[in-house]
Image (spheres, rainbow, N blue to C red):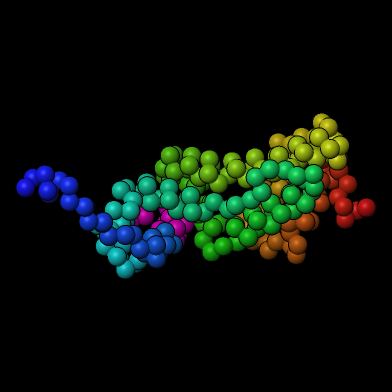
Amino acid sequence: MDTVLQNAPKRAGRSRDPLIDARILTIAREQLSASGYDAMSLTTIAYAAGTTRQALYRRWATKADLAAAVVSDSVDGGAATATDAPYEDLVSELQNFQDGVSRPGRMSLVGTMLQDNTSPELRSRYQEQVIAPRRSRIRSYLARARQLGLIDWNADLDVAVTLCTGSWYARELAGVAPPADWPRRTANLVWRAVGGTPPTDR
């Protein structure tokens, strides 16, 4: 009898509803952006998402896990490697950045990461998953341009990388809307700053 029970096929558990997952992540992002990590409430999030706290815990065991999932869901894709057209790679990257940072709540999430009471672990994950990959891609385009002789060989790439996205954050803080065609205009400015001639100038 015991052998029969042991060999009986196990019943599959209830599959996760991806719509509930998406609702939870959306509401968690709103809370995290608006109120910060400390005030983020799993009970409130579960209620607003139309599910139970137990269902939420089955998906994310802790508040830190859910916040980390919000961060991972905020990653914007981009080209993985530089091509022989690094200027256009840079423009595409900045367009991708603009599309991502313009989404509702995204700038507030950036502000949350700068708050003193944000979990260091969460901030570190945001830096590793969102900030570092973007900076690495931008640097790879500029390094490829240097390799191709399109910009100065001794160009300060560290500062140039920061200039690329830093201008967007500066305008947000100043309450000034970005100019039309921000990605290409920014790429043009940075390209000239590192000794290159943008295709639009030729």
x and y percentages locating residue 193 in the rendered image: 82, 43
x and y percentages locating residue 191 in the rendered image: 81, 46
Residue at position x 48%, y 50% in the image: 71
Residue at position x 39%, y 62% in the image: 18
Asked if residue 189 lies left or right of residue 129, the reply is: right
| Residue 188 part of the magenta-drawn span | no
**Which residue lies most toward the right here?**
202
Report if residue 186 is visible in the image: no
Residue at position x 6%, y 47% in the image: 1
Q: Give the residues drawn in magenta, as a range.
A: 27-41
Picture layout, residue 78 above or below residue 150: below
- Total marks shown come to 0
Asked if residue 124 lies left or right of residue 40, the reply is: right
Q: Quadrant of residue 44?
A: bottom left
Principal secondary structure, stretch drawn in magenta: helix
Picture layout, residue 178 above or below residue 156: below
Q: Quadrant of residue 11?
A: bottom left
Residue at position x 42%, y 59% in the image: 25
**Which residue lies most toward the top here?**
154
Picture layout, residue 186 above or below residue 46: above
x and y percentages locating residue 19 in the rendered image: 39, 66
Asked if residue 173 lies left or right of residue 65, the reply is: right
Asked if residue 3 lies left or right of residue 100, the reply is: left
**Which residue lies most toward the left here?**
1
x and y percentages locating residue 21 in the rendered image: 38, 60
Report if residue 108 is visible in the image: yes
